[in-house]
Amino acid sequence: MSTHVYYVPPVNLMGKGCLKDIGPYIQELGLKKALVVTDKFLVQSGIAGKVTAVLDDIGLDYALYDDVKPNPTCKNVHDGHNSLIANGCDSLISIGGGSPQDTAKAIGIIATNGGHISQYEGVHQSKSKALPIVAVNTTAGTSAEVTINYVITDEDRKVKMVMVDKNSLASISVNDPELMVDKPAALTAATGMDALTHAIEALVTPGSYPVTDATALAAVELIFNNLARTVKNGHDIEAREQMVYAIFLGGLAFNNAGLGYVHAMAHQLGGVYDLPHGVCNAMLLPIVEEENAKVVPEKFRKIAQVIGYDIQGKSDKACADYVIQRIKDLAVEVGIPTKLSELGVSDPDLDLLAENSMKDACAPGNPFLPTKEEVIAMFKKII
């Protein structure tokens, strides 16, 4: 019997209006001054202000770093770390989707371990726990607020570095759907499909086990039932809340089971061409799963069942075909592009993309390990 280790933040608040309740939990951490890590849009839109108002209420001093980019870079991280030191901060409050969350994790790691962030690429490379992080999520997708993963772009190598590090785990995660209601439909769609990718990759990976399967399947069902609703009506707070539960459940699944080649390939598109991560995942998900289904078709039976397929008497292949078609249909329904040319990339460097995909930290979690030629063939399907 294998030993499974399950990572999850110590405290997790979720549900409509939960932001207002975080004050006492932050006070229990005994913080003196926090660096608020976010982006300019969230500051200008007033969303970050809703969080800092809570900090004001509990008397927690803080400084602001709002220069996080959509695909955060090494420069972002080290600029943020410099701000942390200059302002005498002992903790981090991250506000946003995956980019601010990942940036805060990276700052927290180098604050306690030193060095350059590129030194921590890979699995559990740090020795010391990051500074305390209160991760306030504002998008239903990345699950970065509850995972041990973070991704930083090395702008010199044009590579997305994947860090899987138990020391980067947040002290408190916050998922309040009321912070998500004004998000654009395209962002809602992309982050929602990112969440679906997390759950499905967690289900088909050899690293899955009954506990991760249970949360991933629940996430898949919630996403299929609620994502299109949230895209069509961003103020549908009930659907938004169900998506919050989905990203939490899916995050716990892939955080402990692993991911695969959808993420390995999507990371390269983001690193080389600065493309949105969720959109890249959504475009690649049915393509990679078509190949995975040839190797582990049995993994798709329960997925098919939770999204409404009568699996009685059906073959594993039929179940897999159903799941893959439903993924494609959902992507079309929520407006996901189908070709890289729609994102401004008409002639990608397939050799570079394939080589970097095969080196990605997520690649070993795939049910099969493709050759370079097979990776290129998958990329060609979205050109």
Image (tube, rainbow, N blue to C red):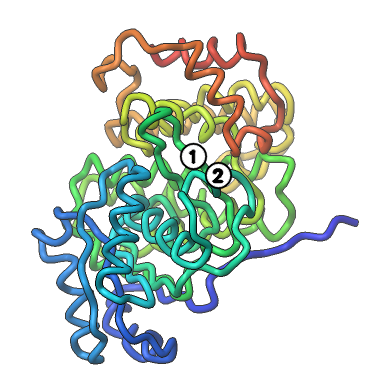
Residue 216 visible in image: no
Q: Quadrant for the N terminus, please.
A: bottom right
Which residue is tagged 1?
A: 161
Vertical placement of residue 340 versus 212, above or below: above
Amino acid type at circle 1 is Met
Residue 162, x across and y down, in percent: 52, 42
From where the camera sits, is residue 375 visible?
yes
**Would residue 330 appear left or right of 58 to someone viewing this image?**
right
Give the percent coordinates (x, y) of residue 251. Answer: 52, 56
Identify residue for label 2: 121
What residue is rendered at 26% in x and 86% in y?
60
- In the figure, is residue 290 to the left or right of 286? right
The image shows residue 378, relative to residue 96, as above or below, that is above
Labels 1 & 2 near each other (Cβ < 8 A): yes
Asked which secondary structure carries label 2, the reply is loop
Position of the C terminus, as image quadrant, is top left
Badge 1 or badge 2: first in the primary sequence:
2
In which quarter of the view is residue 175 placed?
bottom left
Q: Residue furthest left?
A: 44
Residue closest to the far right: 1
